[in-house]
Amino acid sequence: MDKVRDKEDSCIVRIRHLMTNRRWMRMKSVTTVMIALVLGCILTVMLSMWHLDVTFNHSFLSGQEKSKETKYVETLGYNYLPQPKNTTTWLPKLTLNGKPSWNSSELASFSTESRSILKNNKAIAPHTLVPDNDSLLILSPLKNNADHLERYFELIDSLEYPRHKISIAFLVSDSTDETQQLLIEAKQWYQEHSPEMRFNRFDIFHQDFFYSLPRIQRHLYVKQRDRRIMMARARNYLWTRALGNEQWVLWIDGDLEYYPPSIIHDLMAYDKDVIVPNCVIRKKDKRGKWRNNLYDLNSWQETSESRSMIESLEDDTFLAEGGDAPYITHRKYLNDFDEDEELVPLDGVGGTFTLVKAHVHRSGIGFPTWLFQHQVETEGFAKLAKANGFGVFGLPNYNIRHVTE
């Protein structure tokens, strides 16, 4: 009998233990289900909010496309709306014939010297072509250029070239001023409020390279290699993003002070793959008089002496002109040519005002970010173009002017 009772007690204990485990399992299952329901609710709410946001953005952007209004700038895949502030006073007013009217007494002070440059250029480039059907893409990489944008667009508006044949694109990089905001306003003004002056295309790109260099140090030799490589990256980003089916590409610096209205026709008339004018800058001489001195030292021609010097260099030696460079390159700059030398072959070019046939870029010729024959950026571009059979030329006596620094 005792054995029977022991077995009954053992069975009862097992049954109680089993029931306890089942309660625990049920409680655990209920808890799991509760957690799953809560997470499901949270996920549903998040998906609903995302759907509303996408629907709003889609309808907003669709409305922009329908009205052809350009109120945002592409920047790293995002759309940034312009700030709701009134800073349009720098833009020109439209005249009765739809042309912009720029009014700047400060700029008018240079008119006498500008007329002198224009007279000189007409004398050495008399075979200006009649406007034709060639399309043109103007490219300008900009950084902290807000103070020069008014003059930039005033010069663009003065160009004697069919406006509907001109597209224009900007790359804003590492700027801390209002360059990007002013460009957005300019885009709205030209493309939406000024039908006569509307560009075929007006693009603004933004790509920061996180590179900062005080302006006073930008010509130091020890800074040149990194600085020029960064500029090459900016130029490559811009032309690869902006170039469409245009026939010509024109690189223009954002801080030029003057170039003639006929310059595009004048340069196109030579029918060269790459061509540059002579960029000068106003400086006072010892007597206090203003003189036009050479500015762009990056446009040059190799000489027998410079080639001999290059042959003695190590492969990783970077060459830069002027400044505090530890060597003399013995190259021939545009101001070293005679007055009767109208068109000369070059081995290096700058980027202040460079006209390029678009097929040069389309063939893969960009701006080297690595050393190519000891050069990078625009000078490396010229070397690379020549190595691929393209012609690179300069006009020693056809002048444009850079702002005084």
Image (spheres, helix red, strand yellow):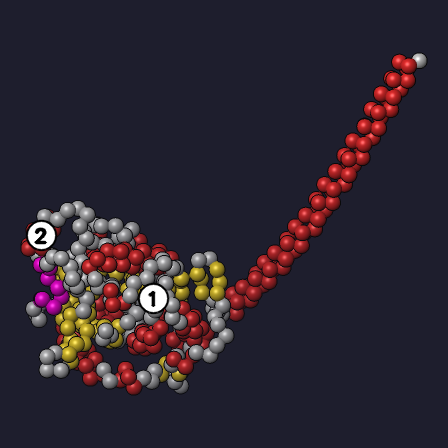
Residue occupying the point 32% across, 62% down: 212
Residue count near mark 1 (Cα–Cα under 10 Å), binned few <14, some 14–19, many ≥20: some
Please give left or right for residue 344 compared with residue 251 in the image: left
Q: Nearer the viewer, residue 89 or 155?
A: 89
Q: Amino acid at mark 2?
A: Met
Disc number for residue 143: 1
Front residue of 372/120: it is 372
Q: Position of residue 12 (x, y in %)?
A: 87, 24
Please, which residue is most extreme toward the right here? 1
SS of the residue under disc 1? loop
Q: Which numbered marker is on residue 322?
A: none
**Label 2 CA crowd tier, 10 Å (few <14, some 14–19, many 20+):** some
Q: Quadrant of the N terminus?
A: top right
Locate residue 303, reporting x and y percent: 8, 57
Q: Which residue is mark 2?
A: 309
Label 2 element class:
helix
Q: Earlier in the sequence, mark 1 or mark 2?
A: 1
Left or right, 64 with respect to 40, comes to: left
Is 17 above or below relative to 351?
Answer: above
- The amino acid marked with disc number 1 is Lys
Give the alpha-carbon distance from disc 1 to disc 2, as whole Å. Answer: 35 Å
Q: Residue at x 30, y 57 (%)?
A: 230
Which stretch appears magenta?
330-337
Query: Which residue is situated farthest in the front direction here?
Result: 2
